[in-house]
Image (cartoon, coloured by chain):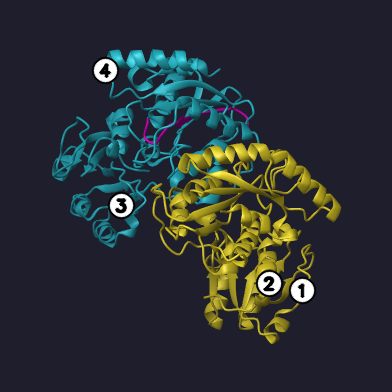
Chain colours: A yellow, B cyan
């Protein structure tokens, strides 16, 4: 539905974490992006071609994708002139922000005047059912994290890729805007109305072949004061058979919450399992995914070995080293 | 904003649990209801005057309040002719259902034609902030349950009443449609968008006097597959200093989920405390509220004694026996 290729708009993102939507597209569907657009003061860089709107149109870009996920999901006034320039140059705009494109009168006016389309991928396309808690056929794996933005989506994408590589039946199930932009389908869970959260995940992961795995993208963290409710709805709606614990070892506090420390992997394991077993008594933790992007090769290997010994489970960085051992753990 | 007195509409509610909105108004603000309206086959009865629309208008009713909370919150076609009759007779309509009055063209047309008002109290009146997890002044008490509909709102209303009776500073904080209809203010939590759930509860329970208690209405249950995410957002947004465990001992399975057993009070205590202490390490369970409505006087007393011994905490039915001991536990 969204026309590719894309121009990835990084705006004034202060750092790469804020640009994780664009980064996800670049990492998993690099053929879909012709370049990046960065504003004055932008601290993020995907390492691809910087382009003006005119450059992007000349390179064939059909859609400007807002690749920034700032706190609260606001469309900044500073972005507006760029977005309007893009519409006037013949591009559509796609966004996963809470602040909808369709709620900005100047963008709507420019889209109307130019005949271009505003895509708000965050808006749930249907009314989801209330969860019924019934056991479904097929198997499900969910990534849960010590914090937000520790690599749960990457873990799921890498695991899905490796499952298919090993000839296993697997589907990546997107639950966030970047996952949806990457795969074209999914549930924008954090925009779903509270009562229907768990039901939306049941809807996303229906009955399937007995040997098929849904690899469900995680959201938030049970230990994150802002988003924990979303995480629990995902656990109870997803009814996972397998959990993968995700962790970023250099984080100094919970993302966006300076007063909060990350839990230990043991705390994450115990809390997640206890809650998952409410809906699936057979649920097990099968592996650990460590985001080692801020560690050297030697430090990453040492840390993974240490975690593997400490937890008695395969511990890998699926983005750095591949998800082979995680896929092997799903039987 | 909603004009009283009310006519409480029970529709075709199959049982009293389905009519808990009307029951709550009748129990806590009986002076606001002139009577009840029951349709053919209605299995609920508040024990107040049955009235036709004409009777209610003659008795001074200003607003028909939909007192039924059915699964999914649908406005049934069978209700429509009664609701339109009420509008035509000069009453407003107030509803807390998911299915909004304003989304029903025939009701909107009748309201427009008659000049009456449709109140959807479920619709969040503002955009809430994302939770910041910061410690607030004042104290907070939250009721958590082994299941949905076990008496969490009644516990909070009774406790707030008794706190004021004991001369303590206290505010009941409504988080659901009946609480909002009873008190005229609050957050319709299950209709809030996922990302803003915890923030809406921070907003509802702001900084206050050091000796002031917010008595927060609970929602759902950590052990209920459909609504657990809402409950966790309430725990993390509310940052409770004190938890009260709520239980209905005659329930045979989780409400609406035939395959699920209720957890034990110990399981509820341990899971709730572990999660509450993520945001408030000083949180304690201070008492237990048992809904003994289906037990005889003797059985209720015996059960409460047993629970009190088993758990080492005051165990009361605040609706049957008053909330004195729970209020004493909040210091």
Q: Is residue A9 above or below residue A319?
A: below
Image mark 4: chain: B
User: Callout 4: 10 Å neighbours few (<14), some, many (20+)?
Assistant: few
Left or right of residue A186, residue A144 in this image: right
Instruction: Work out whether residue B43 or residue A112 is closer to the camera in this orientation and state it.
Output: B43
Q: Is residue A57 above or below residue B143?
A: below
**Residue that carries the numbered disc 3 in the rendered image:** B74
**Residue that carries the numbered disc 2 in the rendered image:** A8
To the question of a shared chain for discs 2 and 1, the answer is: yes
Q: Quadrant of residue B23?
A: top left
Span of residues in magenta = B136-150
Secondary structure category for the residue under label 1: loop
Q: Which mark, by number, is residue B71?
A: none
Q: Are marks 2 and 1 in contact (CB under 8 Å)?
A: yes
Secondary structure category for the residue under label 4: loop
**Residue that carries the numbered disc 4 in the rendered image:** B296
Q: Give the alpha-carbon distance from disc 1 to disc 4, as whole Å.
A: 74 Å
Q: Are marks 3 and 4 in contact (CB under 8 Å)?
A: no
- Circle nearer the viewer, 2 or 1: 1
Secondary structure category for the residue under label 2: strand
Instruction: Work out whether residue A8 or residue B109 is closer to the camera in this orientation and state it.
Output: A8
Image mark 3: chain: B
Q: Quadrant of residue A113?
A: bottom right
């Amino acid at each position: 539905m969204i026309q590719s290729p894309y121009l990835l708009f990084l705006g004034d993102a202060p750092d790469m974490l804020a640009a994780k939507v664009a980064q996800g597209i670049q990492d998993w569907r690099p053929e879909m992006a012709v370049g990046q657009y960065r504003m004055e003061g932008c601290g993020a860089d995907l390492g691809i071609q910087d382009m003006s709107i005119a450059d992007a149109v000349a390179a064939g870009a059909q859609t400007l994708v807002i690749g920034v996920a700032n706190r609260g999901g606001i469309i900044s006034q500073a972005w507006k002139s760029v977005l309007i320039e893009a519409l006037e140059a013949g591009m559509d705009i796609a966004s996963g922000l809470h602040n909808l494109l369709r709620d900005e009168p100047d963008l709507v006016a420019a889209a109307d005047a130019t005949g271009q389309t505003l895509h708000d991928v965050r808006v749930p396309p249907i009314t989801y059912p209330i969860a019924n808690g019934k056991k479904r056929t097929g198997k499900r794996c969910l990534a849960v994290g010590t914090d937000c933005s520790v690599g749960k989506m990457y873990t799921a994408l890498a695991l899905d890729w490796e499952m298919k590589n090993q000839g296993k039946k697997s589907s990546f199930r997107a639950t966030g805007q970047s996952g949806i932009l990457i795969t074209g389908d999914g549930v924008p869970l954090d925009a779903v109305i509270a009562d229907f959260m768990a039901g939306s995940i049941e809807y996303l992961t229906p009955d399937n072949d007995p040997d098929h795995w849904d690899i469900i993208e995680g959201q938030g963290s049970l230990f994150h004061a802002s988003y924990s409710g979303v995480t629990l709805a995902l656990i109870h709606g997803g009814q996972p058979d397998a959990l993968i614990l995700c962790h970023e070892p250099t984080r100094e506090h919970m993302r966006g919450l300076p007063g909060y420390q990350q839990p230990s992997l043991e705390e994450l394991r115990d809390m997640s399992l206890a809650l998952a077993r409410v809906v699936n008594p057979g649920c097990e933790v099968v592996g650990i995914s460590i985001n080692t992007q801020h560690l050297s090769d030697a430090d990453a290997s040492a840390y993974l070995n240490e975690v593997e010994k400490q937890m008695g489970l395969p511990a890998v960085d699926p983005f750095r080293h591949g998800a082979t051992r995680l896929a092997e753990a799903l039987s």
